[in-house]
Image (cartoon, helix red, strand yellow):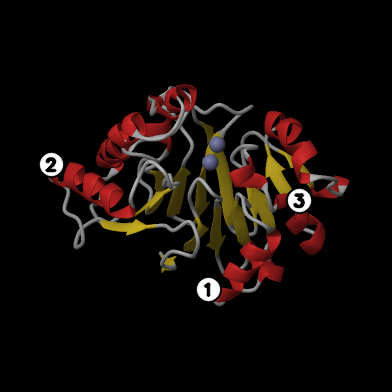
């Protein structure tokens, strides 16, 4: 199984997962043109996409989903509440490409299973993607971490974990108070500290590949997110590089492309 974050951040999200006989996107939150361009940039073929899975209806996750479905004749998978909330935004989709699912989907040799997270949208989810004995977990856009999230992402080989903001930067930053409260609240986003603590809880083998994602432009710096998480892992006696492979994702370009 191969994984690459094409884009990640509050300005748009799109993750790429591929095996020998299946290719999927998780979210398509930039223009169709930008997403297709980045797929070409990593040496892959946009025409090979078999399905797009949506985590929730916010524009930074669905902006290009409709256009890509229409252009490439690709099905979109999401739960019923997310479909209802995003339909007006993504435009008309061919009936056969509307896939409403709650529990499990199979695309080629991939099995995709959603789990609930905590965010201010209709029915937000994270995803586990399985192929043979390998597992990739993606969790962004959650204001709190609960036992369900922790148990869902245990034993993953690759994790994409939201490291949205530094709490102090949010508090002293330019956002108006209601927005600060939203970001920091139970239905907002995960901080660098929360990401570090969550990752520490789910690392088992010590060789996992962990991507930090969905960084805020206003309330974080890549180096601050990286160092904060690295320090928390080390405090929990988890070795990093070598050991756990801690990687960044980027708002404007693809991450490293890993194969497991
Ligand atoms: Zn969101
Ligand atoms: Zn988002």
The disc placed on residue 235 is: 2
Mark 2 Cα within 10 Å, few/some/many (few <14, many 20+)?
few
Q: Position of residue 73 (x, y in %)?
A: 80, 60
- Ligand 2 contact, mark 1 (Cβ < 8 Å): no
Q: Which residue is drawn at 29% across and 56% down?
A: 246
Mark 1 Cα within 10 Å, few/some/many (few <14, many 20+)?
some
Q: Look at the image and tell me in which quarter the C terminus lies.
A: bottom left
Whether 158 is drawn above or below 87: the answer is below
Which is more toward the observer, 47 or 31? Answer: 31
Horizontal side, residue 214 vs residue 223: left or right: right
What is the spatial separation of the Cα atoms under label 2 and label 3, in whole angstroms?
44 Å
Mark 3 Cα within 10 Å, few/some/many (few <14, many 20+)?
many
Which is more toward the observer, 38 or 17? Answer: 38
Q: Residue at x 77, y 63 (%)?
A: 72
Horizontal side, residue 93 vs residue 206: left or right: right
- Numbered marks: total: 3
Which is nearer the N-term, disc 2 or disc 3?
3
Q: Position of residue 235 (x, y in %)?
A: 13, 41
Looking at the rendered structure, the secondary structure element under dot 3 is helix
What is the spatial separation of the Cα atoms under label 3 and label 1, in whole angstroms?
22 Å
Q: Quadrant of ligand 1?
A: top right
Q: Which residue is drawn at 53% across and 73% down?
A: 42
Looking at the rendered structure, the secondary structure element under dot 2 is helix
Which is nearer the N-term, disc 3 or disc 1?
1
Whether 151 is drawn above or below 139: the answer is above
The disc placed on residue 66 is: 3
Residue matched to label 1: 42
Q: Residue at x 38, y 29 (%)?
A: 145
Which is nearer the N-term, disc 2 or disc 1?
1
Quadrant of the rendered image containing residue 108: bottom right
């Amino acid at each position: 199984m191969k994984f690459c974050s094409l884009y990640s951040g509050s300005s748009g999200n799109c993750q790429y997962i591929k095996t020998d006989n299946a290719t999927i996107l998780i979210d398509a939150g930039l223009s169709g043109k930008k997403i297709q361009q980045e797929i070409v940039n990593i040496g892959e073929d946009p025409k090979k996409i078999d399905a797009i899975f949506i985590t929730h209806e916010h524009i930074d996750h669905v902006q290009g989903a409709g256009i890509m479905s229409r252009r490439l004749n690709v099905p979109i998978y999401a739960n019923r509440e997310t479909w209802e909330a995003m339909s007006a935004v993504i435009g008309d989709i061919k009936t056969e490409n509307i896939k409403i699912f709650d529990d499990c989907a199979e695309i080629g040799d991939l099995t995709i299973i959603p789990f609930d997270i905590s965010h201010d949208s209709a029915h937000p989810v994270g995803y586990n993607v399985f192929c043979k004995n390998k597992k990739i977990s993606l969790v962004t856009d959650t204001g709190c971490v609960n036992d369900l999230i922790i148990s869902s992402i245990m034993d993953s080989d690759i994790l994409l974990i939201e490291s949205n903001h530094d709490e102090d930067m949010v508090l002293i930053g330019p956002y108006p108070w209601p927005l600060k409260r939203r970001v920091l609240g139970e239905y907002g986003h995960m901080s660098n500290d929360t990401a570090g603590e969550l990752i520490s809880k789910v690392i088992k083998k010590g060789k996992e590949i962990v991507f930090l994602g969905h960084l805020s432009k206003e309330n974080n710096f890549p180096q601050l997110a990286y160092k904060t998480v690295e320090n928390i892992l080390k405090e929990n006696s988890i070795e990093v590089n070598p050991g756990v492979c801690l990687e960044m994702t980027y708002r404007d370009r693809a991450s490293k492309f890993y194969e497991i």
